[in-house]
Image (cartoon, coloured by chain):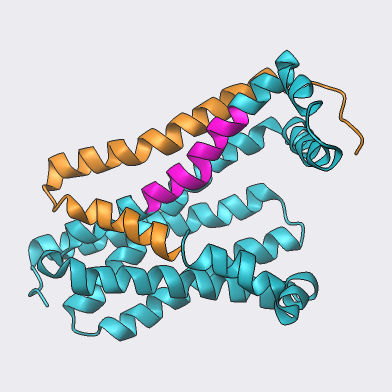
Chain colours: A cyan, B orange
C-alpha cells in the first residue's frame, strides 16, 4: 500500500513503456505484475523473518505471519470495499444516491454514475467469488511464508527467497493473463483453488516434519 | 453517461454482506484459533500485516 501500489499506479503509469506493456502485451504485463508483486512481498517477508522475527524462526510463526499477511490483504482489499459497496448499494436502492450525486459537478457526477452502473451490472455471484478467492490466497500466503522460513532455517535464505518470488509470479501472472484473455472467472478461481489445496498440503507437510524433527534455529 | 435503470438485487446484498463479514472476521478467527492451538509469538501476525501494508 505504501511501496508497490503507489509505484505502479502513480510512477509507472506515467511511463510510456509501462502503458504500452499494459495495453498491448498481455503476457508481458501479467508476468511483470506477478514479478513485482513477488519481489516486493517476498523480500518484505524475508526481511521480516531475518531481522524482526529472528527469535521466532519456526513453522508456527511462519504460518502466523501468513495469517497476518493474507488476513490484512483480505480485510483491506475486499472486506472494507464490500462494506463500502453495501452502504452505496443501500443508498442506490433507496434513491439517496441519486439525490446526493445531483449536487455534485458534472465531472464528478459522471464518475459516481459509473460506480452506480458497475454495482448494478455486476452479477451477484461475483461478490461471493471474492470471499472464495480471499480464502484461497490466504493459504497461498501461509505457504509462501513457510517456503521463505524453511530457506532461512536451512541457511539457504536467498535461494528460497528467489523460489518464493518465482512461485508468487507463477501464481499471480496467470490470473492477470487469463482475465485478459477473457477466460471465465470460475476457471480462474478453480486454478487458484488448486494452488490453495497444494499450499495447504505443503503447510501441513512442513508442520508435521518440524514436529517430528525440529530444525535448528538460524 | 447513460444510467442503468434498475436496482441492486437482494442476493447481491446478501453476498456483499457475507463477503464483508467473512473477509474481515475470518482472518481474526484464524489468528485466534491458531494461537490457542500453537501458542505462537503474537507479533508474527502483526508483523505480517504491517509488512504487507508497507510492501504491497
The answer to whether residue B54 is visible is yes
Q: Quadrant of residue A157?
A: bottom left
Q: Is residue A146 above or below residue B2?
A: below
Closer to the camera, B9 or A195?
B9
- Toward the right, the furthest residue is B2
Count of numbered circles in the view: 0
At x 44%, y 38%, the residue is B23
Position of residue A141 measured from the top left corner of the image (x, y, whole percent): 38, 59
Which quadrant would the C terminus of chain A be assigned to in this image? bottom left
Closer to the camera, A101 or A206?
A101
Closer to the camera, A74 or A116?
A116
Q: Is residue A154 above or below residue A10?
A: below
The answer to whether residue A64 is visible is no
What are the residue bounds of the magenta stretch?
Answer: A70-86
> Is A128 included in the stretch rendered in magenta?
no
In the visual, does A175 lie left or right of A179?
left
Q: Is residue A204 above or below residue A77?
A: below
Position of residue A44 measured from the top left corner of the image (x, y, whole percent): 35, 70
- SS majority, magenta: helix
Position of residue A107 measured from the top left corner of the image (x, y, whole percent): 83, 43
In the visual, does A175 lie left or right of A59?
right
Closer to the camera, B5 or A194?
B5
Position of residue A18 measured from the top left corner of the image (x, y, whole percent): 70, 77
Q: Quadrant of residue A199?
A: bottom left
Q: Quadrant of residue A154?
A: bottom left
At x 57%, y 29%, the residue is B16
- Toward the top, the furthest residue is A94
At x 63%, y 64%, the residue is A9
In the visual, does B4 lie left or right of A210?
right
In the visual, does A133 lie left or right of A182?
left
Amino acid at each position: 500500500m505504501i511501496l508497490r501500489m503507489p509505484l505502479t499506479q502513480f510512477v509507472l503509469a506515467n511511463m510510456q513503456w509501462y502503458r504500452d506493456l499494459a495495453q498491448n502485451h498481455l503476457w508481458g504485463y501479467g508476468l511483470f505484475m506477478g514479478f513485482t508483486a513477488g519481489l516486493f512481498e517476498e523480500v518484505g517477508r524475508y526481511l521480516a523473518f531475518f531481522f524482526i522475527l529472528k527469535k521466532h524462526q519456526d513453522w508456527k510463526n511462519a504460518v502466523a505471519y501468513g495469517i497476518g499477511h493474507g488476513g490484512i490483504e483480505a480485510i483491506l482489499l475486499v472486506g472494507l470495499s464490500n462494506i463500502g459497496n453495501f452502504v452505496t448499494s443501500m443508498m442506490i436502492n433507496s434513491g439517496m444516491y441519486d439525490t446526493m450525486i445531483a449536487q455534485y459537478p458534472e465531472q464528478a457526477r459522471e464518475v459516481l454514475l459509473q460506480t452506480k452502473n458497475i454495482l448494478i451490472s455486476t452479477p451477484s455471484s461475483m461478490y461471493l467469488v471474492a470471499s472464495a478467492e480471499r480464502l484461497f490466497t490466504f493459504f497461498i500466503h501461509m505457504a509462501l511464508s513457510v517456503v521463505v522460513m524453511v530457506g532461512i532455517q536451512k541457511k539457504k535464505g536467498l535461494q528460497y527467497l528467489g523460489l518464493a518470488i518465482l512461485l508468487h509470479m507463477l501464481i499471480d501472472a496467470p490470473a492477470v493473463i487469463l482475465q485478459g484473455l477473457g477466460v471465465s472467472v470460475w476457471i480462474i478461481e478453480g486454478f487458484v483453488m488448486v494452488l490453495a489445496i497444494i499450499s495447504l498440503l505443503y503447510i501441513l507437510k512442513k508442520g508435521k516434519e518440524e514436529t517430528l524433527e525440529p530444525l535448528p534455529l538460524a | 453517461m447513460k444510467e442503468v435503470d434498475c436496482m441492486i438485487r437482494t442476493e447481491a446484498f446478501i453476498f456483499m454482506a457475507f463477503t464483508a463479514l467473512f473477509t474481515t472476521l475470518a482472518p481474526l478467527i484464524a489468528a485466534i484459533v491458531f494461537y490457542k492451538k500453537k501458542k505462537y509469538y503474537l507479533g508474527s501476525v502483526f508483523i505480517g500485516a504491517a509488512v504487507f501494508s508497507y510492501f504491497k
